[in-house]
Amino acid sequence: MYNYQNLVYENENGIAIVAINRPKALNALNAATMRELNDLCDKLAQDKAVQVVILTGSGDKAFVAGADITEMQAMSAIEGREWGKLGQLVFNKLENLPQPVIAAVNGFALGGGCELAMACDIRIASEKAKFGQPEVTLGITPGFAGTQRLARLVGKGLAKEILYTGDMIDAAEAYRIGLVNKVVAPEELMAAAKAMAQKIMMRAPVAVRLCKAAVNEGLDTDLETGTAYEAEVFGLCFATEDQKEGMAAFVEKRKANFKGK
Ligand code: CAA
């Protein structure tokens, strides 16, 4: 159990449910919230009691409406760079947590909010969710890796359109372009995220984590290096009890009972 000012944390049977909790500012990320998220990522990375993380926003209006504009308004260039670096560091930590992370996008995911969702492994959106990178309407570029992750997720052309126009897109369009994995009714969002988390938790935990590491490592390098990494993690799986159990269960026509070892 972790206690924070701007995050609500709960562990529900191995699923960490984290809500960014500044509903009056549509969950905008200020420095205090970013520092809490940083601390939480450090703790989650070591937390054996957490198998999957679900990240969402408090209230029914916003996931996260961006970095806090009131805090950024008077920043100097040096402060802006430090703020961008902090956000990037925290989102990199989130992306590289050993556990799978699902974003349950319950409303506006704009600027830093869209960037936060993109640092998660999987995005499930409510029909009410809206995505965008409106930074150019404020005279800035995205600062928490939006220019990088958006282009990797939806391709260069669509990313540039979203970045240059600052337009919001709705959940259906986000699904069409591959920005989100699934769209569900608002009242079904958390149930859908938990159902996906539970399904992942039934699979071999070490193999799931190695899949995550292989995708993350591989997409940041060339195919040859990525496939070499895959061969290593594939081989490593054969040293686990879960591989023995998984294959024995298949041969014996029964359900596997994985221990995460
Ligand atoms: N920062 C600080 N406060 C914010 C905020 C933000 N990003 N987004 C919303 N709020 C605040 C509003 O100022 C308002 O506060 P008050 O009640 O005190 O006036 C409250 O949240 C509710 O917002 P609105 O009244 O504006 O709600 P709305 O329904 O009319 O509009 C919205 C919703 C379209 C999301 C609108 O709030 C909006 O455009 N927000 C800003 C979105 C944005 O530009 N995000 C990008 C920020 S820059 C960034 O993130 C840089 C980066 O990459 C690191």
Image (cartoon, grey):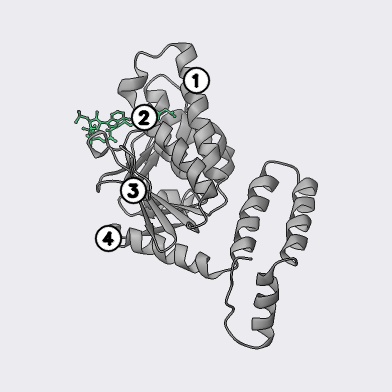
Nearest to viewer (mark 4 / mark 2): 2
Task: Name the spot of residue 155 as percent of width and height, x first.
Answer: 58, 42
Closer mark to the observer between disc 3 and disc 1: 1
At which x and y percent is residue 133? 42, 33
Of the two numbered discs 1 and 2 on the same chain, state the one appearing first in sequence: 2
Q: Amino acid at mark 3?
A: Ala
In percent of width and height, residue 53 lies at: 45, 53
In front: label 1 or label 2: 2
Name the secondary structure under disc 3. loop
Going by the numbered disc 1, the residue's amino acid type is Glu
Gap between marks 3 and 2 measured at Cα: 25 Å
Q: Point out the tag, 4 or 2, that comes first from the N-terminus.
A: 2
Residue at image location 54% in from the left, 54% down from the top: 99
* Residue 144 in view: no
Q: Is residue 210 above or below residue 40?
A: below
Mark 1: few, some, or many residues within 10 Å (few <14, many ≥20)? Answer: few
Q: What amino acid type is highlighted by mark number 4?
A: Glu
Mark 1: C-beta under 8 Å from nearest atom of ligand 1 = no
Q: Is mark 4 within 8 Å of ligand 1?
A: no
Give the residue drawn at x 75%, y 60%.
236
**Is the C-beta separation of discs 3 and 1 under 8 Å?**
no
The dot on residue 82 is 1
Mark 1 vs mark 2, CA separation in Å: 14 Å
Q: Amino acid at mark 2?
A: Ala
- Give the residue pinned by disc 4: 187
Choose between 186 and 4: the one closer to the eye: 4
- Packing grade of label 4 (10 A; few <14, some 14-19, many >=20) is few
Q: Earlier in the sequence, mark 3 or mark 1?
A: 1
> Taking 86 as reference, is 139 left or right?
left
